[in-house]
Image: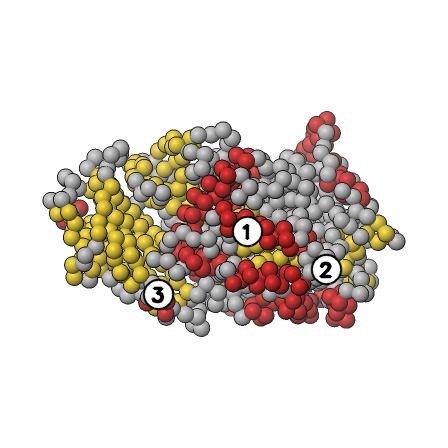
Amino acid sequence: MSPRVRNGQITGPFPRRRIAVIRRASMATLTGSVAASPSVVSDAMATRARPLLLCLCLCFASSCLSSAVDAAAAAGNGYRTTAFLVDDEGRRLRAELVAGGGGGNTAYGGDVQRLDVYASLETDSRLHVRITDADHPRWEVPQDVIPRPSPDSFLAATRPGGGRVLSTATSDLTFAIHTSPFRFTVTRRSTGDVLFDTTPNLVFKDRYLELTSSLPPPGRASLYGLGEQTKRTFRLQRNDTFTLWNSDIAAGNVDLNLYGSHPFYMDVRSGGGGGGGAAHGVLLLNSNGMDVIYGGSYVTYKVIGGVLDFYFFAGPSPLAVVDQYTQLIGRPAPMPYWSFGFHQCRYGYKNVADLEGVVAGYAKARIPLEVMWTDIDYMDAYKDFTLDPVNFPADRMRPFVDRLHRNGQKFVVIIDPGINVNTTYGTFVRGMKQDIFLKWNGSNYLGVVWPGNVYFPDFLNPRAAEFWAREIAAFRRTLPVDGLWVDMNEISNFVDPPPLNAIDDPPYRINNSGVRRPINNKTVPASAVHYGGVAEYDAHNLFGFLEARATHDALLRDTGRRPFVLSRSTFVGSGRYTAHWTGDNAATWEDLHYSINTMLSFGLFGIPMIGADICGFGGNTTEELCSRWIQLGAFYPFSRDHSAIGTVRRELYLWESVARSARKALGLRYRLLPYLYTLMYEAHTTGAPIARPLFFSYPGDVETYGIDRQFLLGRGVLVSPVLEPDATTVTAYFPAGRWFNLYDFSLAVATKTGKRVTLPAPADTVNVHVAGGNILTLQQPALTSSRVRQSVVHLLVALADDGTATGDLFLDDGESPEMAGPRSRWSQIKFSGATESGGGVVRVRSHVVHDSYAPSRTMAIGKVVLMGLRSPAPPKGFAVYANGVQVNASTAVGGAAGSPEKGALGVAHVSGLTLVVGQEFDLKVVMTY
C-alpha cells in the first residue's frame, strides 16, 4: 500500500518493510535508481524483478565488479621500508614506509606518501598490526566503542634499530616485516604455518585502502565469518565478495550486505605441518565501508577510509579464538533468564483485544509463551514512546501488561531511531532543546521513515544518550515494558539524499546491494556530520551499536535489572549490549536453512543471543514449513515467531500439527533451560557461542568443516532439523563417539570415526541428541520459565566410551545486572561421572565452585538418568548410595535392544532422590548380579 500525503506531509501508512521478498534486490535496487518520493520507494519495495531485467542487471553488475577489480589491481605502487623502532622486550615494533615509485598511479586518488606501521604482541595470543598515515590523523574506531591499548605510548617504549621480527617464547604468533617492497607475514611459531601473508602491492590513499593476503592451497583453509549477509553455506565460498555497509535490505536476499558489519573471520586449517583443526582469527577493526573478496587462495580488503587496523588471534582451538576475540571487543552481555523462553510477535496486530486473544490462544493450546511483543502498530502515528489512543490506549495496555506480569510473562515493544518532526510531539520538542540530532548542510538532517519527516538522534553526542534514557524512563512510567527492540537503525531512510560533496560519492564504489548502489541510497547522507565533526561517511556502520548501547544503559538505569535489547543493526562489539535477530527473512524452505548459517556466524561475532523469525517474516508460510520451523527455532538461542502485515497469521496454535510440533520441541527447550542459561554464563565469561558449528567440539574432524544443516548447543547437544518439504527422514552427521536421543535416552549412534546416519523424522519431531561425555541439568516443562525454575531437577548423565561425563550448572536470579559479579548472588556447580569396577559401579559427584545464591540450597535433584551403561549380563538389582549412605531410591532399566554396542545395558533411571543442588554430593549406583 502507498503512503498518504496530506499538506505536503507523509501521514502513512507505509509498507512495514520489503515484504515481497525476492532472491535478488527489487528493480529499483538492481538499477541503482534514486526514488525521490516515498511513493516510489513503496512501489519499488513491492515490485518483483522481471527475469529479463534481472539477468541484464546481474550481467551489468558482474561486468562492473570485474572492471573494478582490474582497476584496483593497478591502483597502487606499493611501499618500501625506511626505518625500524623496536622495544627492549621484543614485543613491539614500528616501521616507517614511503610510497614506491612507478609513476604515481592516481586511480582512486593519490598515494599517501608516508606510512607508519605499528606491530605489537599485546598478549601472548593477540597480535596487533596497525598501518596509518604518518603525517595526518585519520578516522579510527573510537576508543569508547572498542576500548583497547592505545598506540600513543608506543614510541616511548621503542628504540631505533633491532630486528624485523616479533617473536617471544611464550607466544605462538610471529610477526615479520619484509622490507622492499613492504609486506608482512604472521606465522604460527609452533608449526611454521603461515596465517597471513600480504602481497607487496599495499595501497593507501585518502579514501581507498587495499591489502591482500594469500591463503594456503585450496582445501587447507576453511573460512567463516565476514558478515552480515544471508549465505547459502556457513563456510565461505571461493570468489565471493562481502560488502560491509549497514543497509536496510531484506534478509531474504542472499549474498547482499545487510544490517551489520563484522570484518572478522575464523580460519580453520586442515592438514599441513600443524596437523588438522588449528584455528586462528583475523579482525580488521575499521568502521568504513569496504568490500572483502575471498578468492579461495587469497583475501583482499578494499576499504574506503580509516586505517588498516588488524588483530590476529592465535587460537589454536575455535573456542580459544572466540575467547581471545571477545576479550578484545567485549564479552557478550548476560541475557535475562526469561529471554530464553518463547517469544511471539507480529507486525499487524490490530488492537489490545488481538494481543489478549493471542495470549489466550497459547494458553489454551498448552504451548509455552514467555514474551508478547508488538511491532509499530502500538504507536500513535508510528511515533516512538507513544500509544495509539484508539487501538492501544494506555488504560487498556497497562492492565494487559500487568496481567502478563502476574502470570510470569513479559512484554517487549519496538522503537525506531527516527523522531517525528512535529511541534506537538514532546519527544521531538525535548530533543530540539537538547540539540541532539544529526546535522547536514548546516541544519538537522531531515529524513523520512514510518512517522513521516524525522530527525535522527546523534548517538555520538553524549547528550543524545541522556535524552534517550529520559524518554525511555518516561515511557516506562506509562507502560512498564520489559525490553526494547531497536529497529531500522542502519540508519534506514525512505528517501535517497542527494550528494552534497565528494564524500557522498567516493572514487571506489563498494558493492552496495550487489550493484554498487551509491552509499547514500536508503540511508542518511555520508556527508552528514556527527558530534565532534565526525562524518557519517566514517561512522555509518556504528549507528546501530551506539543506539543499542544507549538503550541498554537506559534500561539498566531505569529498572536496575539486567536489560534485554534486540537490535537489527550491529557492529564489532555489539554483543556487549544487545541480542540480534536475522532480520526480514522470507517464509521459504531456503530461508529456514540459511537461518542456521547466520546464527552460527553471529556466534563467531560475539553475539550469541541470535535467532531468526520463526515461520518466516515475509510472504505466506505453509503449515508444514511452520511446523518444521518451530522444530528448528525452538533451539535458536533467541526463539521468536514474527511475521509481516498482510501475510497469513502464523501463531503456533493455529494449526494442530504445528501445535504438536511446538509442544514437543518447546517442551524440550524448556526442560533444557538450565543448560541454555549455563551456556549464557559461559558466553558471558569466555565468549563461547551458545549455538555452535560441529567443528567447535570436533576440530580434528574435517568432515565437520562444511556442515551447516546441523548445529550444537554448547559442546554436546546436537540438533538435526528437517529442512526440506515432504521429508520423513533426515540425514545427519555424527562425529566419533556415542550419541543418545534426548527424547527417550536411547543410544542412537556409536561410531569410532564419524558417520552419516539416516534418521526417522516424524512430522512432529526434530532429532536432538546428546554426545557421550556430557552431563545435562534439566527441569520439568511448563508454560513459563518462572514455573520451570520451581520444578525438580533431573541430571542426565551420558557416559562416553571411557565411562566418564562432565557438566556444569550456573544459577542466579536471572535478572541481576551482573552475572557472577561481586555484587550478585550466584552459584556454580560442576558435575562429574565415571564408571568403576568394570562398569558395575557408576559414581556421580558434584563440586560446588561458588554458592551465594540461596535457592540453590533448596533446589533438589530428584532423578538421575544414566545412559550408556555397559554390563556383561542383565543386573538383578541396584544399590544406591548418597554420600556413603544407602538410600531407598527406585530404579528402572532401559534395555539395549537395537543398540549399536554389544553389551550396552542402555539406560538406568534412578528416582526418588533428594540431592541438594547447592551441597556437594557423591552418588554411587552399584549394579548387582
Q: Mark 3 points at which residue?
A: 856
Q: In the figure, residue 254 lies in which quadrant? A: top right
Q: Distance between the residues labelled 3 and 2?
A: 46 Å
On the rendered structure, is 695 left or right of 179?
left
Say which element carries label 2. Answer: loop
Quarter holding residue 2: top right
Q: Mark 2 points at which residue?
A: 389
User: What's the distance in space between the residues labelled 1 and 2, CA to CA?
Assistant: 23 Å
**Who is closer to the viewer here, 703 or 164?**
703
Residue 182, position as x, y percentages in the image: 57, 49
Direction right: furthest residue: 7
The answer to whether one can see residue 366 in this image is yes
Q: What residue type is labelled 2?
A: Pro
Q: Residue at x 18, y 58 (%)?
A: 887
Q: Pick out the residue farthest to the left.
A: 929
Query: Secondary structure under badge 3?
Result: helix
Point 30% across, 40% down: residue: 746
Q: Which residue lies furthest to the bottom in this view?
A: 823
Residue 482, image x, y percentages: 56, 62
**Earlier sequence position, callout 1 versus callout 3:** 1
Image point 31% across, 53% down: which residue? 795
The residue where tag 1 is placed is 360
* Place of residue 205 in the rendered image (x, y in percent of width and height, measured from the top left): 69, 51
At label 1, the amino acid type is Ala
Q: Nearer the viewer, mark 3 or mark 2?
A: 2
**Neighbour class for label 1 at 10 Å: few (<14), some, many (≥20)?**
few
